[in-house]
Amino acid sequence: MTEFAMTPDRPILLTNARLIDPATGREERGSLLVRDGLIADLGNAVAAPDDAQAVNCGGQVLAPGLIDMRAFLGEPGAAHRETLKSAGEAAAAGGVTTIVSMPDTNPVVDDPAIVDFLYRRARDTSIVNVLPAAALTKGLLGVEMAEIGLLREAGAVAFTDGARSVTNAQVMRRALTYARDFDALIVHHVEDPDLVGQGVMNEGEFAARLGLPGIPREAETVMLERDMRLVRLTGGRYHAAMISCADSADIIRAAKKQGLRVTCGVSINNLALNENDIGDYRTFFKLSPPLRHEDDRQAMIAALADGTIDVIVSDHNPQDVETKRLPFAEAEDGAVGLETLLSAGLRLVHADLIPLPRLLQALSSQPAEILGLAAGRLARGAPADLIVFDPDAPYVLDKRDLRSLSKNTPFEEARLEGQVTLTLVAGRIVFDRRPT
Amino acid sequence: MSDTPRSVFPHRHLLGIAGLSAPDLTALLDLAEAQVEVSRQVEKKKSTLRGRTQINLFFEPSTRTQSSFEIAGKRLGADVMNMSVASSSVKKGETLIDTAATLNAMRPDLIIVRHHAAGAVHLLAQKVDCSVVNAGDGAHEHPTQALLDALTIRRNKGGIAGLTVAICGDIVHSRVARSNMLLLATLGARVRLVAPSTLLPPGIEALGFETFTDMRRGLEGADIVMMLRLQRERMNGSFVPSTKEYFRFYGLDQEKLGYAKPDAFVMHPGPMNRGVEISSEVADGAQSLIREQVEMGVAVRMAVLEALASHLPNR
């Protein structure tokens, strides 16, 4: 990371940029003026104050910073895998300006004091915004509702049991009912643990060949169908954290058609990879939900293109050698992803599967809308959380370059296109890849 | 003072508020009003029920209601027998109907019943020849509580019609709420139900009551704020997350009471969970009618027993 040459209070004029506002779909050549942490002006006739620091974007894309609705950070309790500081640096390098942190920590984020701790810790150590999601049930045990009202007052942006599913339908019903009174968002990992059973990868031909127990798609669809019924019953605000198969997309599509307050996400991994990438039992590809068949990956891309899928998440989950250098079935789930989220997403753009504004929408304006954030758009008065990137810049990923404390990336040695040049958070440059 | 009951109450049992007309309710309240003075005299004894046998059959423990019915019966001259479930044959597996038949064979005149199952008192009433008073059946009705609440309101507000009454808290499990909703609506009050959605009975709006999940909006302009007890087993994550959160958003403290009218009164059927649904400051404060409710309980139960006396067997 280069030095912060500019004083934070000095206005910054980003010139010669290809402005893309995913919230409106507007695209134009022009400049953008940042002042006092906000977007002061933008377009092709921006009047810059005399003291503004000009930054030439060289024709690169200027877009809102990415908002990642799902990342597991190591604090509190697992700072050897990731800290808010290391995650923040990885995020900034990947163009992510806001991270929603999962409550699966030690202790669990089910107490307003821990939400408070995360905000203070992030303010002191992270260069990007960290917004804590709190536990939906106490201890993530799926039995008793957490203090949704008090946690929301403390600043929790969503309620989720993180990597766990709430299997008890009565608990889920009551949580949806109760959360509605506070207009709180429930985010659910849809995977029935009983149907997952011993499964460690997608059920099917490939698992059969590897001799690994499979996870049927129904582990996801059964839980998702149940949730849709409960949302209809309760009127709660619901977001399926990640879907992974074609049938799930159909379920969400139907629910939206019914007018239910339902949104959903997809992991970048389920868009960019499939089960064949597991190859010779490579544990960095052991994920939850599992990588599915190529047909499912195609279905995810189609669902993203037609708006059924609202957001793309990194599902950033740092694991170290102790938890990954194990026989496949014994290894932990998860992959890091903050730093590769945009590059991996751009694969879909380069393959002409989705247009760039749609990708950016799913990575910024739509998560912002679901979370009720002012960020995620290029508009006067919006927070100056911004990225400048060259969508075509080619590179080969070397995991030693990753800023995350954990290196469990599924994109090791992958050829990627698209790199972030500049990242601004609240009007300050927090990442700068320009040659010095 | 006459011991002759006015036969203004055309029902043999008091099983609920449902089915009672405004004149029925007003007659009971008028009758109760007269009993208040009786209890304040040195000589509290009347002879309306002399020679009569009253059995208090409580399948659920209750200090307040049971003693209130006992005192009411005794002040009217009845022989009162308390039968609590702990010492009864119910513990030995006797069914409700067998218990009713056994008691009936002893020729009581009045049976006061509390049971944990909604509808149990109705069932029992079909199997006995005497009058039956519902002292609370499950989450269904608790008519004498609603009557004593109404009497308390009437004495302090001069009437019921036109008042805005906010019933707050655990509505879904509350027989007190159900009886009060019916009674107050019948007598022309505007009833609001204020609770988190998990404690509101699904479908309740269809019965014509306004519901609120926010105390500020629910209490705005209320003349009476009626708090309900939150049972311990519902406090820790099943219906509401914690007592701390419940008190923060739904507990009646001085600040939330400030949303109601300045001359609003606070009520609670007891027993209270201080610091859960109500603060001590409010419970013991100048706007509280909670102590008076207990006093009215005896008067109302005397009135009910008197009203039923005209329908007793052998009359």
Image (cartoon, rainbow, N blue to C red):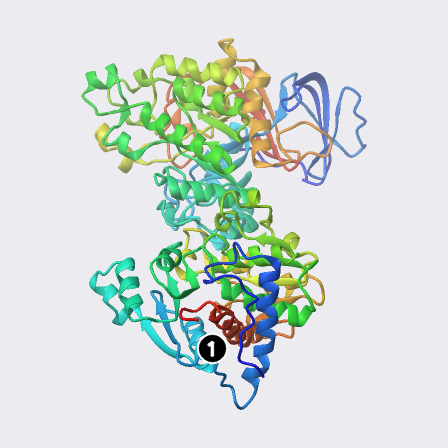
Which residue occupies the foreground of this view, B149 or B53? B53
The x and y percentages for residue B125 are 38, 59
Amino acid type for the residue under numbered disc 1: Ala
The quadrant in which the C terminus of chain A is found is top right
Residue placed at 43% from the left, 57% from the top?
B235
Which residue is the extreme one toward the top?
A352
Residue placed at 58% from the left, 21% from the top?
A389
Which residue occupies the foreground of this view, B108 or B151? B108
The residue at which mark 1 appears reads as B72
**Residue B290 occupies which quadrant of the picture?**
bottom right
Whether residue B306 is visible, yes or no, is yes
The x and y percentages for residue B215 are 61, 55
* A32 left or right of B26 in image: right
Residue placed at 41% from the left, 47% from the top?
A137
Up-down relation of residue A127 to residue B100 (above or below): above
Which residue occupies the foreground of this view, A374 or B37? B37
The x and y percentages for residue A116 are 52, 52
Which residue occupies the foreground of this view, A323 or B307? B307
